[in-house]
Amino acid sequence: MTAFKSLYRSMRRVLPSITRAGSWRQYPIGLSLILIAPLFLLLGFGFVYPVAQLLGQSFFAPEFGLGNYRRLLETPLYLKVLVRTVTIAAIVMIAALILGYPVALAMARIRRKLSGLVMACVLLPLWTSALVRSYAWIVILQRRGLVNDLLLGLGAVGEPLKLIYTQSAVIVAMTHVLLPFMILPIFGAIRMIPPELEQAARNLGAGQLSVFIKILLPLSLPGISAGCLMTFILALGFYVTPALVGGPGSLLMATLIGQQTTETLDWGFAGALSTVLLCVTLLIVVCFRNVLSNNRGISNVA
Amino acid sequence: MKGEPVIIEGVEKSFAETPVVRDVSITVKAGEFLSLLGPSGSGKTTLLMMIAGFETPNRGRISVGGRNITFEAPNKRDVGMVFQRYALFPHMTVAQNIAFPLRMRRVGRAQTRERVSAILNMVKLESFADRLPQQLSGGQQQRVAVARALVAEPPVLLMDEPLSALDKKLRESLQLEIKRIQKRLGVTVVYVTHDQEEALTMSDRVAVMADGQLMQVGAPVELYHRPANVFVAGFIGKMNFLHGEYLGQEGDEAIIRLSETAVMKCPLSTYPIVAGQSVTIAIRPEDLRVTASAVSKPQGLRGRIEAALFVGAAYAVLVAIDGRPGEVLEARVPVSGGSSPFTPGDQVDIFAEPQTLRLFIDQRRQAA
């Protein structure tokens, strides 16, 4: 009993320092555990277990060993797919940043009514499925689609261009689909910057460009990093859009994994591919975090 | 650094058809400390924003040191500003914040370091150069904001209620410090505040604004003793108002009837006045004399003590006036002995020296 008491006492001492809000002091520990339990069970059975199963199979199917990984590393095609996936994800991230930042800035700084309208335009695509949006790109980019019809009509080209089922089509469509994930965090970050800071900078002699570079950009970095991380990770594992608008020349990891599980039924190799993709993603996230935490401006504002 | 005059001529500003600043003209002399004082919504902040360049007047002209800056970009005006919530850049250290205006003006590295440390020394924050703004207290942050606004040596410094977020004690010590810095640098200051005490203690002159209009500009003593209208009289310091009727003139004094039995004499103002006109008399609490009514004077103002409140150096005595229900005058009675000179319910006589009174003709709505 005394041992239990001292344990309880030490927990009360330690826990508030772990949970900074100190909410443990308001709710009994037992209740907190009960409240967390459903989510843990769902995550455990619905996510951790199947993923672990898949990863495990990469070592055991068809037989125990590193055969699946050797196959992945020894086949140039698979390595090429991996490199292409990372490259395309990076390009999509940068494109979304360049396209998204001005929109986020405008949304944060225009009048409330107008900003609601822009917000609706940004969010509307999120409410439609990625499938629909990807098909829309097929309509636009196909052989006799909008773009080709326009170019032909203007006489700019003699015959339809091959726009769909190319790497560029994948990049364009993915950028479009993932744009809201870039805009929203940046919008949130810019909205947190008090407008007086811009006024103060102007008053102290800064032109519009200096205000942007010296004040807005550094203070919106938390939003930029969140948006970049989100679009990049989503792009790494994106399945629907590349599968629909991409061709054989623009095969990505997610599509490749899909093929292994549904067409060749090679679960072991699919597991190996997933493991590698997961490791690459984790590696990049860790790098991202390290770079950012070295930047004093961000850790202070965020 | 030398201050430059700020001249505001006939400036008007409306937001969506609602006039916020109406035909305001003020000349701030070089090196002067001028406060814009008024209740919220009086247009004082809008006027300041027009000097800073964040708003553009619909009409009128603003110039600094003879330079017309009415439509100049804010970064080209060379007018320093201290914001209400300090507006320090959270991602820069104190030294970087203060160096910002120098960097924008392409001042050399060595000179920047020198000037930053000199001004940090002046605001007594030398040891905080490498701290971030959020690691400072409110008062320290405000001093950094002042240093940052002054480091590039602008001839004019604008301050938008810079002390309103601080507690009373800190506010008072910072008032003195700002005043000391201003004296030393000779910079022209335009200071916006809604705190009349602050305006009176700090300013060379105070411009009282209400409803977008300039009510009176003058030295604090002048505003206190010779308010130009009822608004200024009521806004600056404590003031009692008595409403009455103008009866006529006796020498150079006006006779005002306050009730059936009471009349009061006060200096006649210059404006034309006719018998029967309704007027308002303004009396400072410290100018009211209250005595226990022993001898009944025929034409004096009489009342009954409602309360006598100890306020430190004096008693604030509230007197309900006989024959004028609901009207209570406040008087200051110096503390003598220790106990209150009056108890509630006492009958008293009230009078005041005529020269301490101010007479105002009641304005009809259409006349205003």
Image: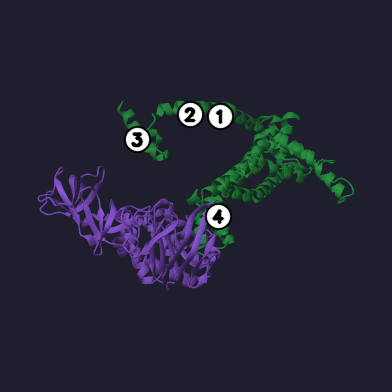
For marks 4 and 3, give the one nearer the viewer: 4
Q: Which residue is mark 1?
A: A43
Q: Estimate how packed mark 1 is, as few (under 14), some (14 to 19) or many (20 or more) residues with alpha carbons within 10 Å.
A: few
- Image quadrant in which the C terminus of chain B is located: bottom left
Q: For the residues marked 2 and 1, what is the alpha-carbon distance in whole angstroms?
A: 11 Å
Q: Chain of mark 2?
A: A
Q: For the residues marked 1 and 3, what is the alpha-carbon distance in whole angstroms?
A: 30 Å
Query: For the residue marked with disc 1, what is the amino acid?
Result: Leu
Where is residue B333? Give x, y as percent. 17, 53
Q: Estimate how packed mark 3 is, as few (under 14), some (14 to 19) or many (20 or more) residues with alpha carbons within 10 Å.
A: few
In the image, A162: left or right of B214?
A: right
Determine the residue positioned at 16% across, 43% down: B344
Mark earlier in primary sequence (3, 2): 3
Q: Which residue is mark 3?
A: A10
Query: For the residue marked with disc 3, what is the amino acid?
Result: Ser
Determine the residue positioned at 37% across, 38% down: A14
Q: Chain of mark 4?
A: A
Q: For the residues marked 1 and 4, what is the alpha-carbon distance in whole angstroms?
A: 39 Å
Q: For the residues marked 4 and 3, what is the alpha-carbon distance in whole angstroms?
A: 45 Å
- Res A36 label: 2
Q: Which residue is mark 4?
A: A216
- Say above or below: B31 vs B232: below
Mark earlier in primary sequence (2, 1): 2
Instruction: Look at chain B in the picture and name its colour.
Output: purple
Mark earlier in primary sequence (4, 2): 2
